[in-house]
Amino acid sequence: MATVSLKPSQGDADVQVTYEDQQKINTFANKNAKLVELKEEVEAKQKELQNLEDASDDLLMVDDESAPIPYRIGEVFISMPLEATQEKLEEAKAQIQQQIADLNGQADEIKGVLGKLKVELYAKFSNNINLEMDEE
């Protein structure tokens, strides 16, 4: 998460923080928090996608194609034929991939806004403000 902090001026003329500046700083902090949240959500979706791909791979090794395959819908497992289960997995994978693409699109929009705000805030406050990501 990025740190937004104003440092005491080092001999330079005092820079006044206006209401608009404070709004920009708050917007930066909120957008940055949303970006972190989106990144975590993308990671979770990627794990979910990997699990679905692993399940698809496991279905390729099924010996008895006539045996019903348990497929989880919500909190319930439903026995389905192999072909229907494979179709459901492909649909679920496509849906997750679309969700990942949407989340990445939102993250890119937020990165654009953050970039503009960084330029504006650094232009006014130069070294008196820190908008960089914390090392974790």
Image (cartoon, rainbow, N blue to C red):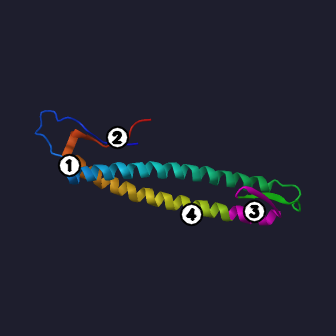
Distance from the alpha carbon under mark 2 to that under mark 1 = 17 Å
Residue for point 67% across, 51% down: 51
Quadrant of the drawing holding the N terminus: top left
Position of 36 with respect to 55 (left or right) is left
Q: Which mark is residue 3?
A: 2
Residue to which mark 4 is pinned: 98
| Callouts 2 and 1 close, C-beta under 8 Å | no
Q: Inspect the image, locate mark 2, and give the three-letter code of the amino acid beneath it.
A: Thr
Q: Nearer the viewer, mark 4 or mark 2?
A: 2
The three-letter code of the residue at mark 4 reads: Gln
How far apart are labels 3 and 2 at the CA level?
Answer: 46 Å
* Neighbourhood count class around disc 2 (C-alpha, 10 Å): few under 14, some 14–19, many 20 upward: few
Of callouts 3 and 1, the N-terminal one: 3
Name the N-terminal-most of marks 4 and 2.
Answer: 2
Vertical relation: 95 (above or below) 134: below
Residue at the disc numbered 3? 86
Q: Residue at x 63, y 54 (%)?
A: 49
Displayed quadrant of residue 90: bottom right
Q: Say which residue label 1 marks.
A: 123
In the image, residue 11 lies in the stretch drawn in magenta: no
Q: Which residues are magenta?
A: 74-90
Query: Which mark is nearer the camera, 3 or 2?
Result: 2
Residue at the extreme top of the image, as rendered: 10
> Does label 3 or label 4 sit earlier along the sequence?
3
SS type, badge 4: helix
Mark nearer the N terminus (4 vs 1) = 4
Q: What is the C-alpha distance between the residues marked 3 and 1? A: 55 Å
Upstream in the sequence, badge 2 or badge 1? 2
- Alpha carbons under labels 3 and 4: distance apart: 18 Å
Q: Position of residue 81 (x, y in %)?
A: 83, 64
Find the distance from the CA under tag 4 to the CA under tag 2: 32 Å
Whether residue 40 is situated above or below residue 5 in the rendered picture: below
